[in-house]
Amino acid sequence: MFIEVLIFAVLGIGLGIFFGLAPGLHPNLIVLMLPLFIATNIAALPLLAFITALAISNSIIDFIPSILLGAPDSGNELSILPGHKMLMKGMGYEAIKLTVIGGVGSIIFCVLLFSLIVFIIPALYATAQPYIYLLLIFIVLIMVMTEKGKGKKLLALFCFLLAGFIGMLSSELPIDNTLILFPILSGLFGISFLLLQIKKKVSLPAQGRKELFVSRGLINRGVVFGSLGGVFSGLLPGVGSSEVATLVSVDKNDHSFLVTVGALTTANIIMSILSLWLIGKSRSGAAVVIEQLMTVGLNEVLIILSVGLVACGVAALITLYLAKKFTAIIKRVNYSSISIAVIAILVVLIFIFSGWYGLFLAAICSCLGIAANLAGIKRGNLMGVLILPTILFYIGI
């Protein structure tokens, strides 16, 4: 059984890397493979290792296209902002390295504090569940009120409500619920960003290997607060890693944010799977598949943590290697051509997975993403597409 688990973990790492490097593909699409898993006679533990390795490795390597191409996945939408600023300074590799440091640190943090997490999370969830909508409203207020100037605060609130309205209407479209976020997030945070880059005719500076001076204290704070944010954000449906990272990033600079969002993203992935055991809830596509295939107990949790550590370490090494290669050649290609190619890939994938309705939804969301950018407000407010429907659901409307 050990050999089977190891083989399937390696296969999961490979597929996670593929999903991470392909703009717009998210590991939640693994739900499409559920009928195949059910039809096979593969034992539960190897499949658990495969799914865990896929999700964890993807959370690490996904920052390469997010930072270099501006095509984010759900959860790290805002990482393209500080990451892209560093890219434009010729420090794209360093930006990716910071997210990797955060991701590796977070999984070590979660393993070390596993006993405490098991003790605290179920009790905390039981206490907080009746007030989840209030916590979400509090987060929204912070997001809106941190905008500078009354005018931008009003614009931020308007964009939040408009995005939330789109989120509510999208549930009425004939698109599979497991795929609906693909056109929405691609439009709000991917296609809109790339179109603006094409319009600006961005030219990337040479990406040299530069010495990155980041204090150990900043890294430690980013890992600790990012990991804690990832653990607790698993209790707040509808809130992405980037929004929580904005709140818990202590040092309030680009370096700190990237470490924090790297830690938060990986910790959130681990918690989304462990939530099956801790609170009996699935918080991701990977967790949904696991829930359909097996009952998660202590033995399965130990497999998840062990495979997660291995997958994170391997993915970190591969990510740093590929980031070094990609940043070395990205200057030699036309960035506008890359952006156009990524948009074309996203459009094709959106059509394949969600048809004409998905393309229409992506177009609407792209317009809103462009408008928010031109208005100069934080695009985190566009996460109203998830947060507002969630608030209304918990209120009972």
Image (cartoon, grey):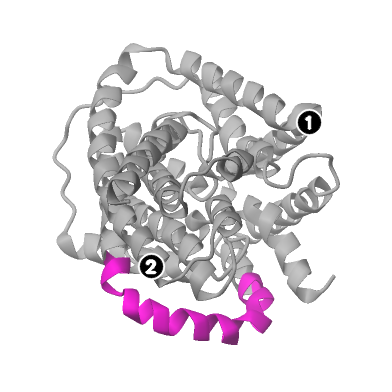
Res 377 visible: yes
Along the line of sight, the residue nearer the viewer: 294 or 395: 294
Along the line of sight, the residue nearer the viewer: 116 or 92: 116
Q: Position of residue 11 (x, y in %)?
A: 37, 37
Q: Which residue is mark 1?
A: 360
59 in relation to 192, above or below: below
Q: Which residues are magenta?
A: 109-137
User: Viewed as shown, does residue 207 lie left or right of 281?
Assistant: left
306 in relation to 365, above or below: below
Amino acid type at image mark 2: Asn
Query: Dot 1 surroundings within 10 Å: few (below 14), some, or many (20 or more)?
Result: some
Q: Earlier in the sequence, mark 2 or mark 1?
A: 2
215 in relation to 391, above or below: above
Amino acid type at image mark 1: Phe
User: Viewed as shown, does residue 245 lie left or right of 86?
Assistant: right
Q: Write the residue at 42% across / 44% down.
A: 54
Residue 4 falls in image quadrant: top left
* Dominant SS in magenta: helix
Q: Which residue is mark 2?
A: 299
114 falls in the magenta region: yes
Q: Which tag is nearer the camera, tag 2 or tag 1? A: 2
User: Viewed as shown, does residue 338 lie left or right of 179?
Assistant: left
Q: Position of residue 176 (x, y in %)?
A: 75, 42
